[in-house]
Image: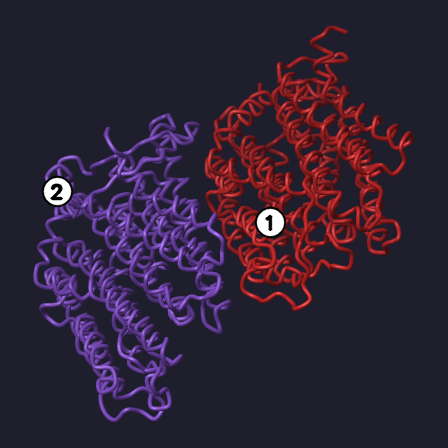
């Protein structure tokens, strides 16, 4: 193995190694939560540095089943940021509930390694391997508060529907393999492109349908979203934050590698499904979120709506003519939106977690009453994240929306109707996001409200999330070249 | 343009002030108040420097002066580009003037969360100034939305009993319009990119203006822009958020809302909707003129029956802003001059009327017209000032309100005598609701309610006089010498009318 190949594998291997190190440290020094947190945090920083050094030169490893190209690079950085922020947010919530940090960190890191495997995988089987490595720890995390009935219930729903959808997805992969005769991503694309007229045989159509359904489960697109609210509500809050971004972005990575790179030649056949999924997902997610009184359920439905916005980027790719700039813009929009979404959504969940720093605080929106006065900084940050989720400039969420809408307008046809649906949805979403602001600033705190205290990791994490939300919004130029390079790598 | 970036400074000073305020301890109320006032006064001073250095001849030659351009998002040719012409200049000065007046007027009424209030106010000023100065469509949109957040907080936190309903209604109405405008902006830029093959300048107003977009795009994009601006103005039937917002907003919020925020809509029409989509504007103009006439008459009739002082002034704004949209869409030079004058004068006069309502509300905690009476006897100075602005609002010749409406009449008459006739009837209705309101609150016996207030019912304080006097002076000045303003924006008005004259109206529903 050459040094270039070793370097290409280093970030993935680093996270796996870090997960193992956490387990080992827990065996040597049981219950040393602070030490575990430090190890995981600084370990992730180290892997982040390695990833930045490794870049995305396009090195293939193991005969090309894993590749470190610009897309892998972009996604790896995102996944590492997700892991780092989650580790920073966790202790304030876990400690008062006596939930062990070591299991949390180890499981999380294994899940992230799965996500990173998906991001760089160029083989159908490795894709599936990565997917399972991602979701199995996810089920464990959802049921992590094992004495909590809601957590267990959510985890079982998540597990049953998740494993069911994995099976459907695998079935779809089998069809694809059967009709193209290869499991290599590039090979599948070559076979499909090689057909003089790209016609959809019955078997391939079946495979496409199964793959679409399986992936739609993973990204929680309507009508495959039913597990989301229960799993999100039941899981411990830092886990919910992770579940709302980690598996979602990873599932979009899966879509990029599978649907865009391998099945791209068939895109005229799947664009219709994506357009309908996107419209349904945005609209239903937002409408149901309007009626929620539980902040975690509300953010769960809002995350469904954001899936819809990200799907608009995919629809723009699929609806545009091959080789047109709109095709690239759609993928760039998808990636940019994902990056923006990571910071703002994790940030919002972090404030919820900070609020629940004492046991006994429920997830009702009313717990936010008077937060703007009780804890001005937390209130201001929550407002920032909510405004970004709404899409008000100059925040990351605004530019993300503008990017996918621009791509949709470029693609033309039915996809540009999605642009209009997306903005109308954003106006609907403003209502429920602003409702939280109303609670924080326009209603008085209950008399027995306690002041908030945050540990330094929580403060660091909040600062990072806020910084990301503001910087990506004010200077989108810091992300755009990365997204452009990643889209370029996908389209060659 | 080299040299001192004055326009950026005008935007940056309130922003820096807001950041500075964040570091002042929240219990130092006086320090916070005076810092905010000082920041607003510095901004006002800078805008006066801009006014003093403005050369109409240079602006006429180049369209805009003092362009400040920095690449912001090169991937899409989005620039941080500012510039000023006569139209934006007068609105910038109006904004900075009303901002410091509003901050000063908030000294006494706002006692809770003063720090947050002042920060919100300064951010609001940043957004408003940015809208007037931006010459890049994307940048314009960013500032347009920035305005929304502080106003949402100002109404929602420091407003009246029904404030939450009012502020959410305000935000949702505005957001629906502006988000569709975002799609239209992106579609416009993309059309430019397709036509020229490059993103360079795709959001640059000066390149897009008069570009001649295809008719389908014009028809659709104009509708989106129209909706955003019509809600902001607000035109009938998009006006229902306005009375709620005004009634619940704190006094200074109402002043800024009526004085500047409504003008954002009128400015948007003049600056963006007409020059970018002239053919579509021509096609839709008859319908928009109808809506304007309805707004003028409807606002006046509804004002007559309002029991609440603030609501009355709010509905009269709907009527007065109807003159602005009428003057814009009649496509006649004097009418457009009148529309811009009317924007400035309405800002001064209605802002002042809201200040007057605030004065009485602060003393009585009531705004019901029926409970007032005999104010002229109890508070003569206050009644005189209120009466002055009441007369200015109904269009007494010699005061500011008259000139704008008169020019709109004259211009409209030249194009459509019927429309002018309908609009003139409102002079009568305006006299009815304003004089009747004034008669009920100022004359007659001192009401039982006011007697029960007792010694609290004092005449205007020196502080209130400081806020009202500049508005009195300017209303007289612009009433007697409207040429002072007209000379500033003659060139851009001529350019807009000239560009429109050459445009062929698009066939509506072109996609059929």
**Frontmost residue, A64 versus A28:** A28
In the depicted structure, whether residue B178 falls above or below residue A90: below
Q: Which mark is residue B306?
A: none
Residue at left offset 34%, top offset 59%: B103
| Residue B64 drawn above or below residue B219 | above
Q: Is residue B127 above or below residue B166?
A: above
Q: Colour of chain A?
A: red
Chain for numbered disc 1: A
Q: In the rendered view, would you say B300 is above or below A194? A: below
Q: Nearer the viewer, residue A360 or B240?
A: A360
Left or right: B382 with respect to A307? left
Asked if residue A151 lies left or right of residue A428, the reply is right
Which residue is more in the foreground, B213 or A160? A160
Mark seen at residue B56: 2
| Element carrying mark 1 | helix
**Chain in purple colour:** B
Residue A131 x, y percent position in the rendering: 77, 32
Foreground label between 1 and 2: 2
Say which quarter of the image contains residue B231.
bottom left
Whether residue A429 can be seen here: yes
Q: Is residue A167 visible?
A: no
Which chain hosts label 2?
B
Residue B115 rendering spot, x and y as whole percentages: 46, 56
Q: Residue furthest top?
A: A2
From the viewer's perspective, is A394 left or right of B467?
right
Residue drawn at (55%, 22%) of the image:
A485
Whether pointer 1 and pointer 2 mark residues with C-beta atoms closer than 8 Å, the reply is no
- Residue behind mark 1: A282
Quick check: do tags 1 and 2 share a chain? no
Residue A98 percent across, percent down from the top left: 84, 48
Query: Dividing the image into 4 quarters, which one contains the N terminus of chain B?
Result: top left
Check disc 2 and report its element: helix, strand or loop: helix
């Amino acid at each position: 193995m050459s040094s270039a190949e070793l370097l290409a594998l280093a970030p993935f291997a680093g996270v796996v190694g870090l997960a193992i190190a956490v387990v080992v440290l827990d065996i040597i020094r049981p219950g040393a939560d602070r030490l575990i947190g430090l190890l995981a945090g600084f370990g992730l920083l180290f892997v982040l540095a390695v990833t930045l050094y490794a870049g995305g030169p396009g090195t293939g490893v193991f005969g090309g089943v894993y590749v470190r190209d610009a897309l892998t690079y972009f996604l790896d950085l995102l996944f590492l940021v997700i892991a780092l922020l989650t580790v920073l947010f966790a202790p304030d919530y876990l400690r008062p509930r006596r939930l062990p940090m070591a299991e949390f960190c180890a499981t999380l890191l294994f899940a992230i390694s799965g996500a990173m495997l998906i991001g760089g995988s160029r083989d159908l089987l490795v894709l599936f391997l990565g997917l399972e490595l991602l979701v199995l720890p996810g089920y464990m995390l959802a049921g992590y508060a094992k004495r909590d009935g809601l957590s267990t219930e959510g985890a079982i729903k998540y597990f049953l529907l998740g494993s069911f959808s994995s099976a459907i997805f695998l079935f779809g992969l089998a069809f694809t393999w059967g009709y193209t005769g290869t499991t290599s991503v590039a090979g599948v694309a070559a076979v499909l492109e090689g057909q003089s007229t790209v016609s959809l045989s019955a078997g391939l159509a079946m495979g496409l349908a199964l793959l679409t359904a399986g992936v739609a489960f993973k990204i929680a697109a309507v009508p495959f979203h039913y597990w989301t609210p229960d799993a999100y509500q039941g899981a411990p809050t830092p886990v919910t934050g992770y579940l709302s971004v980690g598996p979602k972005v990873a599932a979009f990575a899966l879509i990029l590698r599978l649907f865009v790179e391998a099945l791209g030649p068939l895109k005229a056949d799947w664009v219709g499904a994506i357009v309908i999924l996107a419209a349904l997902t945005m609209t239903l997610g937002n409408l149901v979120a309007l009626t929620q009184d539980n902040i975690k359920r509300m953010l769960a439905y809002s995350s469904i709506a954001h899936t819809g916005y990200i799907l608009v980027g995919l629809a723009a790719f699929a609806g545009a003519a091959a080789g047109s700039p709109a095709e690239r813009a759609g993928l760039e929009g998808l990636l940019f939106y994902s990056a923006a979404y990571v910071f703002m959504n994790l940030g919002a969940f972090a404030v919820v977690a900070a609020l629940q720093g004492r046991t006994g605080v429920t997830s009702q929106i009313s717990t936010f009453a008077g937060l703007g006065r009780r804890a001005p900084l937390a209130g201001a940050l929550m407002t920032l994240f909510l405004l970004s989720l709404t899409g008000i400039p100059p925040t990351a969420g605004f530019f993300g929306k503008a990017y996918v809408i621009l791509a949709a307008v470029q693609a033309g046809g039915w996809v540009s109707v999605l642009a209009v649906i997306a903005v109308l949805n954003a106006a609907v979403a403003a209502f429920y996001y602003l409702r939280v602001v109303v609670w924080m600033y326009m209603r008085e705190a209950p008399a027995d409200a306690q002041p908030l205290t945050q540990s330094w990791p929580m403060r660091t994490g909040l600062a990072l999330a806020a910084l990301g939300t503001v910087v990506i919004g004010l200077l989108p130029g810091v992300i755009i070249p990365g997204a452009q390079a990643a889209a370029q790598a996908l389209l060659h | 343009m080299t040299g001192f970036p004055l326009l950026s400074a005008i935007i940056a000073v309130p922003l820096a002030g807001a950041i500075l305020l964040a570091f002042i301890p929240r219990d130092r109320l006086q320090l916070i108040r005076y810092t905010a006032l000082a920041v607003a006064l510095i901004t006002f001073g800078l805008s006066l420097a801009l006014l003093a250095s403005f050369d109409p001849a240079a602006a006429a030659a180049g369209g805009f002066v003092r362009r400040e351009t920095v690449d912001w998002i090169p991937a899409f040719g989005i620039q941080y580009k500012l510039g000023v012409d006569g139209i934006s200049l007068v609105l910038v000065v109006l904004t900075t003037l009303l901002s410091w007046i509003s901050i000063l007027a908030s000294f006494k009424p706002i006692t809770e969360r003063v720090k947050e209030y002042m920060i919100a106010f300064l951010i609001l000023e940043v957004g408003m100034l940015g809208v007037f100065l931006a010459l890049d469509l994307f940048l314009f949109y960013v500032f347009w939305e920035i305005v929304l957040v502080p106003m949402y907080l100002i109404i929602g936190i420091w407003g009246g009993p029904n404030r939450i309903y009012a502020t959410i209604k305000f935000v949702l109405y505005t957001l629906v319009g502006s988000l569709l405008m975002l799609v239209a902006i992106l579609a416009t830029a993309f059309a430019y990119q397709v036509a020229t093959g490059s993103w360079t300048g795709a959001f640059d107003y000066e390149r897009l203006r008069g570009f001649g977009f295809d008719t389908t795009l014009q028809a659709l994009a104009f509708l989106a822009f129209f909706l955003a601006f019509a809600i902001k103005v607000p035109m009938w039937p998009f006006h229902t958020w306005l009375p709620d917002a005004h009634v619940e907003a704190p006094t200074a919020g109402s002043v800024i809302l009526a004085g500047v925020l409504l003008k954002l809509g009128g400015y948007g029409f003049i600056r963006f909707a007409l020059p970018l989509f002239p053919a579509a504007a021509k096609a839709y103009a008859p319908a928009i003129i109808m809506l304007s006439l309805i707004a003028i008459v409807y606002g006046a009739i509804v004002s007559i029956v309002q029991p609440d002082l603030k609501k009355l002034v709010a509905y009269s704004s709907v009527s007065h802003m109807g003159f602005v949209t009428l003057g814009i869409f009649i496509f006649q030079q004097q009418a457009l001059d009148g529309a811009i004058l009317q924007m400035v004068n309405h800002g001064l006069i209605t802002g002042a009327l809201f200040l007057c309502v605030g004065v009485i509300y602060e003393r009585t905690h009531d705004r019901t017209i029926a409970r007032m009476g005999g104010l002229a006897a109890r508070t003569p100075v206050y009644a005189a000032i209120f009466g002055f602005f009441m007369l200015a609002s109904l269009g007494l010749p010699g005061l500011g309100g008259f000139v704008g409406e008169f020019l709109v009449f004259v211009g409209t008459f030249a194009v459509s005598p019927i429309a002018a006739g309908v609009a003139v009837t409102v002079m009568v209705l305006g006299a009815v609701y304003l004089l009747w309101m004034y008669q009920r609150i100022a004359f007659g016996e001192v009401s039982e309610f006011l007697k029960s207030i007792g010694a609290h019912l004092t005449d205007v304080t020196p502080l209130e006089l400081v806020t009202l006097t500049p508005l009195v002076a300017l209303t007289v000045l612009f009433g007697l010498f409207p040429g002072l303003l007209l000379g500033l924006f003659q060139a851009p008005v001529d350019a807009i009318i000239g560009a429109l004259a050459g445009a062929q109206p698009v066939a509506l529903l072109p996609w059929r």
